[in-house]
Image: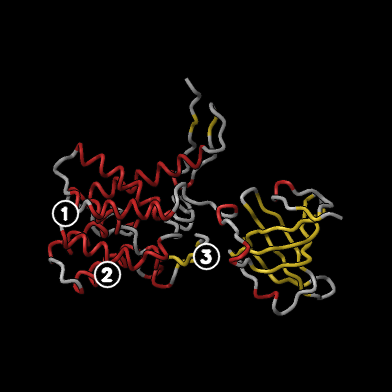
Amino acid sequence: MNIEIMTINQFKAGSRVDGFFLIKSVECKSSSNNKKYLDFTLADRTGEINAKLWNVTEEDEAYSANRLVKVRGMVTEWQNALQFKIEKIREVMDEDGVNITDFVPVAPYTSEDMYNDVLEYINKINSEEIKKLVNYILEEYKETLMYYPAAKSNHHSVRGGLLYHITTMLKAGERLCEVYTFLNKDLLYSGIILHDISKMEEMASSELGIVSEYTIEGQLLGHIVMGVKKIETVAEKLNINPEIKMLLEHMVLSHHYEPDYGSPKKPMIPEAEMLHRLDDMDAKMYDMKKALEDVEPGSMSDRVWSLEKRVIYKAREF
């Protein structure tokens, strides 16, 4: 029987398949005759399928979620649902040339392009001290920033989502500075870049941009407190003006606005207020756009939990 290369939405009972898939979940179980097997959920950009690996070895038990694998096997049918019987499985290797975007949601721009956009905005900062501080922190996080999401779920929870969130806020902030000309662009740009930077220590993410859990420090302190600590440490190391350090710390500390969301202080400078508004707007616009992606014009979306359980209407063309 021929072995086919196909996406999950093309699977049909009786097909023999050889391809690359993402492990969304895996659990070691025992069959009725007490033999171990691995119960997988495999996924690609088109969907997911339950898969079984029988005759499990000790080496096989090392497979874990959020890893890319190459599998070969047979598509079967069980209780009116398709199932995949795995015959061979191995982890993906560099020489396979696998494109991550085929398996996980990603930001609409490449991480390299977005990172360069951020660097351009840093170059627009006039204060050499602020520029030095932001460059130092950005360089420290560069490698992980390329793939980190901005959240475990909800807004910008995609590979490269944190960079996407930062760059869209920078672009919007630049336009609003043309209206509110009294705003200090140096503070606003640096606050935007740094406001969520410690999410990379608050959450544990794989290089696929999938968050598995919140770190202990992330749960006990949260990215706001951790971000303030980061600015404090770097500012002292670089001998940054205390006024600059205090203002940047205030912007990070207040950007969630409410104590229930982690901010013990509300914005007390215009740039901090604008940072909060941009952050809130960008998150809501992202979630609204995502909610409407598969909605027909003239119809309502499902309820969006991150938007106070609202339904969103997709207008007809006119």
Give the alpha-carbon distance from disc 1 to disc 2, as whole Å: 24 Å
| Percent coordinates x, y for residue 248 in the rendering | 21, 60
Q: Nearer the viewer, residue 315 or 57?
A: 57
Give the alpha-carbon distance from disc 2 to disc 3, as whole Å: 24 Å
Instruction: Give the label, 1 or 2, closer to the camera.
Output: 1
| Percent coordinates x, y for residue 110 in the rendering | 45, 51
Give the alpha-carbon distance from disc 3 to disc 1, as whole Å: 39 Å
| Percent coordinates x, y for residue 227 in the rendering | 30, 65
Q: Residue furthest front?
A: 95
- Find residue 212 and name its label: 3
Q: Quadrant of the N terminus?
A: bottom right
Q: Determine the secondary structure under disc 3.
A: strand
Structure colour scheme: secondary structure
- Residue pointed to by mark 2: 229
Dot placed on the residue nearer the N-terminal end, 3 or 1: 1
Q: Residue furthest bottom?
A: 58
Q: Amino acid at mark 1?
A: Asn
Q: Determine the secondary structure under disc 1.
A: loop
Q: Residue furthest right?
A: 1
| Percent coordinates x, y for residue 315 in the rendering | 48, 27
Dot placed on the residue nearer the N-terminal end, 2 or 3: 3
